[in-house]
Every structure is written in structure tokens, then in C-alpha cells.
Image (cartoon, helix red, strand yellow):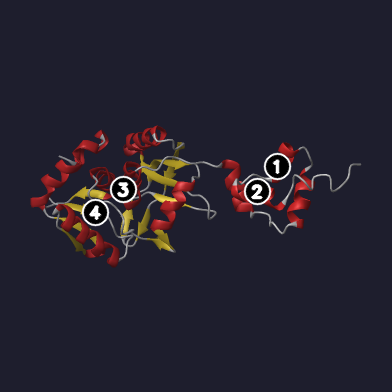
Amino acid sequence: MGDINQFDDVLTKEFLEREYIQKQKNDYLIAFEVGCGKSTVHRYRSRFGIAARNQGLVVHLSRKNTFNLTRETKDYIDGLLLGDGCLVSQSKFSARLTQDFSIKREQWANEIESYFQRVGITSHIVKKVRENRVTRDCFIRGGKAVRLTTLNYEEFHVFWERWYNEKKFIPHDINVLSPWLLANWYMGDGSRATHGGITMCTNSFSKEDLVFLVEQLKSALGFKFTIHKRAMLYLKKRYVDLFLEYIAPFKVSCFNYKWS
């Protein structure tokens, strides 16, 4: 049996703070690189008062999924979250994005998966059957559907902190000038109204959120949305052509009917 203090010159407090805390290495990796056992690293950490990480961080570091968050990607994801996209976070280090689509909109799910792949986000699509449900007096028909789900990423936790505080809300740093953001929002939650206008199903947000969004769309682009019953936004017919032309470059063909 070797000297229990034989690693005193290597496993110093400064070394462990750098390797374990700053570089986020675990006991196994440090032990492998130094040439000792995991328990030895643990003993030296305890000697210097360097606490073990919580389990959520351990799991996160073992996966360590990241992607390059550009302004374009931020706008794209914000557009999904303004609609039916949602984030799930089971730790303070990462989150994943998920969204359900009716089977008629499967093409859009595939387009999103392809875009995510181009920017380094791994996702998968599964088929499912949705039940009819009512959300704040808004009826959502069930039936055959698909669900897109990403892996957990650090960057999605940044989105989670922006969009969630007990419930989903609209962050004040969204870029309503982005036609891709608006296109994803319209394809997800928009519909043509009886009298030629556009209705956006925004009833999951508070009135304060909707007032903010209406003001931003008016001041930035001149689109005059109004808040109607059941907390839905309405765009009058005289603005519809301009709005649809603005977002048309990002239209997915399964939504052609929303432009007709």
C-alpha cells in the first residue's frame, strides 16, 4: 500500500480548484490524469473543503449539449415559443424544446427539425394521438399528431429563464422586426378570420403581455393588432396583405391556405 500522502504535491488546493471547479472535470477524470484512484481525489477535495457538485450539474456535464446561439436562431426559436412551442427544464443547467403538430402540419415539424440540424441542435419526431382539450375557453381538436423534441441544451435554459416565471410570459427583448419570428408565430397560432382579418390565438398570455406585444408590433412595423374577446389578437383586413407579404419568404407550403 502506498503512502496516503504521496499526491500532496499534485492534488493541491489550487490544482483541484482549477480542474474540478473551473474546468468542470469530475473525480474520475482527474484521478485518471493524475494516476490515482477516485477515492483519493475525493479525499483531497474534502481536505480542502471543495464541495461535490449537485446531481443536476453532474448529469448536465456528462451530456454537455450546446449550440451556437446567433441572433437569427434566437428569433427563430422565439417565434416558436410565441406560439405552441414550450420548454421543459428539469435542472437549472439545461432545458429542451418540444412542440406538437397536427398530422397535416408534419411538414413544418420536418422543416424545424432540418433547421435545428443546420444550427447544431439534435431533435427527433414521434407520432402520437392527441385528445380534444380546452385551454382558457379555446377548443383544440385532437387526432393524429407528431411531437418534436430536442435534446437538453444549456442555451435552451437561457430561453427558459426569459420565457418562464411560474407560467409562460412574453419577454421584452423579443425582436418583432424579424419576419422569421412573425412567420413561425403566424403559422403556429394564426388563422384567417371571417371578415378577412387575421386572428392570433394568444389566450395563454396575460393581458399585460398582449398590451406589450400590440404596442411593439405597432411602433416597430405599423401593424395595428387589437385585443379581442378571449384574449386573442386581431389584425384588421387593411393590414393583412402587408403582414403576409412581410413574412412570406419563410412560409412553409403546408400553410398555403393561410395566405390565400
Contact, CB < 8 Å: mark 4 with mark 2? no
User: Identity of the amino acid at label 2?
Assistant: Tyr
Marked residue nearer the N-terminal end (1 or 2): 2
- Mark 1 closeness class: few <14, some 14–19, many ≥20 residues within 10 Å: some
The image quadrant where one finds the N terminus is top right
Which residue does the numbered mark 1 point to in the structure image?
Answer: 30
Which residue does the numbered mark 2 point to in the structure image?
Answer: 20
Marked residue nearer the N-terminal end (1 or 3): 1
Marked residue nearer the N-terminal end (3 or 2): 2
Viewer-side label of 3, 2: 2
- Numbered badge on residue 79: 3
Contact, CB < 8 Å: mark 4 with mark 1? no
Judging from the image, what secondary structure is the residue with disc 1 in? helix
User: Identity of the amino acid at label 3?
Assistant: Gly
Give the residue drawn at x 65%, y 54%.
Answer: 53
Which residue does the numbered mark 4 point to in the structure image?
Answer: 200
Task: Give the distance between the C-alpha atoms of the residues marked 3 and 2, in whole angstroms.
Answer: 38 Å
User: Identity of the amino acid at label 1?
Assistant: Ile
Marked residue nearer the N-terminal end (4 or 2): 2
**Residue 49 in the image: x percent, y percent?**
72, 59
Judging from the image, what secondary structure is the residue with disc 2 in? helix
User: Identity of the amino acid at label 4?
Assistant: Met
Judging from the image, what secondary structure is the residue with disc 3 in? helix
